[in-house]
Each structure stands twice: as structure tokens, then as C-alpha cells.
Image: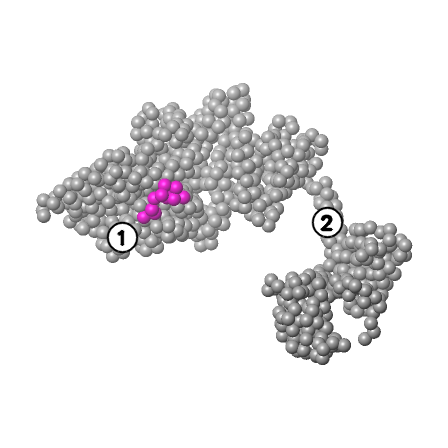
Amino acid sequence: MTKLPGLDHPGALEALLDALDEAVLIVDPNQRIVAASPQLTRLCGHDPRSLVGKNLGVILSAESRAPGPAEDGYRLEAYRQDGTSFPAWVRRRRLAGGRPGTSLLVIRDLSPLEAARDHLQRLEKALATMQVGVAFSDRDQRLHYVNPAFAEMHGYREAELLGAALGLVAPDDPTARLEFREIKQLRRLHYETRHRRRDGSDLAVEVMRDLVTDLRGDPVGLVTICQEITQRKLAEAALRASEERYALAVEGAKDGIWDWDLVRGRVFYSGRWKELLGFGEQEIGDSPEEWFSRVHPADRERLQERLAGHREGLTPHFEDEHRLVHRDGSHRWVLARGLAVRNASGEAYRMAGSLSDITARTALDPLTELPNRLLFQDRLDRALGRLRRRDIDHLAVLAIGIDRLAVVDESLGPETADELLVACAKRLEKCLRPGDTLARDVGDTFLALLEDVRSPENTERVAERILADLRQPFAVAADHAILLTANLGLAVSATGEEEAAHLLHDADAALRQAQSRGRGTYQLFDREMRQNALQRLRLEADLLHALERHELVLRYQPIVRLRDGEVFLFEALLRWHHPERGLIAPGEFLPVAADCGALDAISAWTLDESCRQLAAWAAADPPFGLPISLNLTAAQLSDPALAGKIREALARHGVPASHLCIEITETALARDPRVARAVIVELRELGVRIAIDDFGVGYSSLSHLHQFPVDVLKIDRTFVSDLTRKGQPAELIRSIVDLGRRLGLSVVAEGVETATQRRRLLAIGCPDAQGFFYAPALPADEARAYALTITGRRRGKRAAAD
């Protein structure tokens, strides 16, 4: 080996070894370390002097301990003083001029190189899997690298693009043809352009380009990142075309258009929307109140409820008819329709729709094409004005209620019922004079206005003629001759001083009076009826405030075991504690509540109060856990949300469902047996017990009972009151008791008032009873005390017997 000049200078060899990145070792033939360079401290943490005489295995894995030359070196594990290891490249050389078998080892740390290699592999893998195209080009704008996405979007294989000019795929991109001196002036660019595929077609791309520099900062090329945006461009073009069509449609539409930004609280109203109300383009702003403030007060709450319901996803679309104030002060009937646009979580952020003027259409009933109540009242107003001016003599209003149409609807279908209603309208028109007005009211009711009537007696003759004509058979269904009856209510004005609404109300009251007397009758409104009507109006007004004034109360009547009088259940009975009239029974005020719209609120209060009382009894000292039965109206039975409301009330007061029994009359079941059964099944699944009230007087009780999964039969009080007569009543009760026993149902006799009735019920085998013989309906505290007293007596008798 040639000796390097200068190495004989003192310290020269040590300085040279210290300057190297590698560590140098000298080992003897027995693999013991003879000497080590200072770099070993940096690589392994060992003091070189401490290693002299130690085996090479202290710092290198076993493969390196075998003696002999290795021209290319080894990749081995090297050990640090702290016990960790690192990859090392080891070259071994025989040491010339030394002891035979002595070797020189040079050790290099491979960690930085392998880390760089791993980083490059990860980078290459990331580029290969990216969905956007990436390319590197040199100073001559020739491609040195393209990832698969770049090649694929241009229709090439990667190898075909290497070495090609960037202008091959970007002929229209001016930056792809720049000279090197111009490239150096570039900074990061972001733009849209068009590239060309291998087949010659164009694609729209979004491009980002930036300089690539070396360690000295000199530019060596460009990196290009591009993403195809052809579909986005097509979508933007389609959107522009759609917006143009929308603008043209809005401009030319017959209906008004509205578009509500629910996030910003702003509404776009089209020019036609404003025109329908008599306003110019600049006279209405973009606030929702521009709409709502013009809505008739009677319609505003319903409109806002329906808008809110659709916004919350409760309805598939929005639709509402309401009145809007025109610029001239008149009201226009409009039909508003709309649809909400929702985000991924289902929340509405926009709602758009149309507004149609339906003023002309709303004046007529769509089925019969007769005037509706609104138009009828308008004509009545004008007729009363003529009467006040004495242009005409008396006038009369007739309210005509057609019977049995509901039966036709259920048996022959709604189409036949509608056809029959139209036929009724035609007959009624023939009974009136050409100048009279016939109108369709709600449901099965018509209205007639007779102008210039000489006397009330003439009105009664018209009523008799109408009843006679409607009694004739109707041939509207194949092979069916349908017979109908009707009732009429008549209200006559001699002066025209009445309000149109009051006269209509009088005719309605007379109709109800006629219906209470049986089918095929008429009733002329008189002074006594006016007093009754005024009393009813006062009752309605008072009832609307009864809840907020806490005037409604519940009383609890015990239901007992006949054998020993033990109380096992209470029936909750509603009473109205009127400030002037005292306690009013529900039979008097619930029909009024149904007419004035208070029934739903009263029903909800009754359910909540029953559950509250159950919870109060359970918390009393001592605890009192008897269940309560609660009567259900026919309207409640048709409510699809009934089970949910009962579940919420029970949960709100922490009451088990088994502590509540729901009573349903046979009449309510008869309205729609299919719906009734579905509701009963849902309530049973909830855990609530079901009783059929007034059993035995409804529709085909025995034949239909199996359809309903009930728990209790309550025998109607009329059978119990007739027990004093021998024969049929007792046999009917015995049949019901036997039926209940076979079906596993409890049976309760209602209306037990005498000891004789009790004895006969016991003889028949009826197990349970309810009535004044035991106790009337009591306040909650008295009901509890009564039950506890009966229980105490029974315990005392049992103790005495023992």
C-alpha cells in the first residue's frame, strides 16, 4: 500500500480519522479490538479506549466476527452503548505490515440513507395513488416523471410520456413552451386551461405549477399538478342554462313565485307574486313579514303551522289556502304550495313554491258547483241590505241536513255518496225559485236563501216540499234504489237588522233542534230557541276559559267486587265546576266543546290529570295503588297519535301503564272498526287495559266482540235498571256474564242503585259492579278514604272470623 505523504506528521493520522464520517477499528485474529477511531463515540457512544481488548461482538452482530476480507462489505446490525442498534455498512480489509490475521474495519451508519429511501418510497406510493395528476419536467420542459393519474387522464401509459415535451399534452398552455430563462421568473401559478388527450379530444383541467429548485436554490424544473374538471364545467354550463330557464319561467309564470332562504331569513318574491296583490316590483321587500303581515288574521296561525310542519319534515310538501290583503283593501283567496330543500342531516335550509289566485274558484263547491258558505254569506249580506231598504219583504235562511249519506259512503263507497250528494243538490234546486240561492255547506248540509218571502208560513210550505221531494228514492247506483231523509232548520228575518252570521247561526240551531226530534222534520227558529242559542253561546265562551280558570275537575267512582264490596278500580268522571251553575255533567258541555274546538284540550287535560292523581296516590302515606279507568271519546279513538300521547302522560308522571284502563263505547267502535282495532292493539302493546263501555246496546255486540282485544265488558245501566222486571233483562245480563267468562274477560254491571239489583246480579253470577248503591263519584281524597275504609272493614271481619 502506498504511504500517504504527511501522515508521519505528529497527530496527522488522528486528525484524518476524526474527520471521517465512518468509524475505524483494528481487530486481531481472535476478533479482539486492538484500536478504535474517535468516531466510534459518535456512532455507538463507546469510549474507544474502553473497547481495546474486547471482542468485536460488543459492537457488531455475529456475521462480522468471521475473519477474512470482504471486498463489497456487509450490512450488519451495530450496537450502541445504551443497548439500541442501528443498520451499518462494514468493510473489512487485511492490515498490511501488521500481525498476520489482523484486520481493518470501517463502519458507516446507514440510518440516514435508509430513512431517506423509506421517505422516497412513501412519496412515490402517495403520488402513484393520488387521484390528481402530478408531473415533473426539466428545464427544457421535458417530462421526467408522471404519476398514473396524469398518464391516465391524458390517455397514455406512463412510460410513453417520459422524455416527451410537456406541450404534447398541453399545446394550449403558454407556460408549457417557456424558455429556461423565463422559467426562472415563474412563481406558483393556479389557473384553468385545456389539455389534449392521446385521441385528440380536449379535457378541461385545473392546473397548479411551481418551480423545483436544487439545494443552492437554482431552478431545475417544474412540478405540475392538474385535475380534470370537465364534468364540473358541464354542470356549471347546465346550471347557467337552468338559471336562465328559471328566470324566464318566473318572468312569464301566471302564478307568483316565492323562494325562502331559511338560513338568512330572506324571501325572493317574483314580480307576478307582487302583482297579484296590486304592488309594483320595488314596493315589496324580501322579509317573510311581507307575506305574513298581509294574511287574514283568521288564516295566519294555520298557514304558519303548515309551513313549520313541512319545515320540520312532518309533511311531504306544503300547501295552504288563505286570504291575503290586496292593495285596494279587499281579500284575495290564494293557494300557496311549496317544497323544502334539505341538507344531509335532513334540516331544511330553503323552501320555494308558487302562489295562485283562487278567489274565483273558492266561491264554488267543487263537487256540486254550488256557491259555498262564504259566497252564500256574501249574498245573504246583500239581501239583508235590500230588506233594510224595504226593497223586499221577509227573507228566510234554510239549513238542510241530509241523513244516511255516511251509511251510503261506508256501504257503497265514496263515489256513490258523492253522486248522491250531487243528485240531492239538483232536487233541491228544483224546489226553489229562480231568484233563490242554494249553497253547499260543510259535509252533508246545504243552505238555501229565500228572498222576498211573504210570511213564515210560506217558508214552512217550502220546507215541506223539500222534505217530500227528498223522500223519493234516488237511483244513482246500479240495482240500488236509495232512500234518504232530511231535517231542516228555518230562520226568518222581517226587518233585516240581523247580522248574516247570526241568521246563519239561528238556522243551524233550528236544524239541531229538528234533528233531536227525529228524521224528516223541520223546525222554525223562535224566541225560546234564541234564548237557548244565547245560553249555548255563553256556555261556549265560558268553556273556552274553563281550563285556564281551573274549573274542570275529576271525580272518582269506585268499582267493586260484588261478593264483598272491595274496591279494585276507580272510574274518573269529568265535571265542570261552573262559577254560576255549579257542577255540570259532561253530557251537557262535551258536545259544546266539540263544536267550539275545545274538546282536544279538555281530553288532553283529563288524561294528564288522571295520571297525576295516580302518581299522587302512589306517593301518599300509606301508599295507595288502585288503578283508574278513563273514558275515551270517538274523536280520540280516531287520533293516530293517541298511544303516543298516553305513553308521554304516563312517563311524565312516572305511572305504570297497568294502572290505567281506557273505556271505549260501542258507538265509538262502530264508527270505524278497523281503525278502532288498530288503536286498541297499540294501547294493549303499551300495557294499558281496555274496557268496552255501555256494552249490549251497540252494534252487533256478540258477533263483533272477538275482533277487539279487550279486557273488560261494562254492562249498560239500562239492563241493570230493568232487573226489577222478570225475564229478558236478567237473561241478557246472564248471556254477557257467560260470554265474558268464556273469553276470560272481567264483567262490570253499571248503574247499581239498590240492594235488590245487587242480589239479582250476584244470583246471575256477575262478579263486579259500579253505582250509587256503593258510592257516587267522589273527590280524590274522599275516594281514597272510602277504599281504605272498605279494606279496613274486610280485614276486621277476617280477623273476627279467625
Q: Secondary structure at mark 2?
A: helix
Figure quadrant of residue 80: bottom right
Question: Can you identify the residue that label 2 sits on?
Answer: 239
Q: Where residue 132 appears, x then y in whole percent?
A: 73, 59
Question: Can you identify the residue that label 1 sits on?
Answer: 745
Residue beneath the point at 64% across and 40% down = 261
The stretch in magenta equals: 648-658
Residue beneath the point at 78% across and 68% down = 157
Amino acid type indicated by mark 2 = Leu
Out of 714 and 292, give the one closest to the viewer.
292
Figure quadrant of residue 568: top left
Out of 438 and 744, give the one closest to the viewer.
744
Q: Give the left or right position of residue 322, taking residue 645 as reference.
A: right
Q: Which callout, 2 or 1, points at the residue further toward the start of the chain?
A: 2
Any magenta on residue 719?
A: no
Out of 508 and 309, give the one closest to the viewer.
309
Q: CA distance from mark 2 to mark 1?
A: 68 Å
- Foreground tag (2 vs 1): 2
Out of 500 and 339, give the one closest to the viewer.
339
Amino acid type indicated by mark 1 = Leu
Residue 204, can we see it?
no
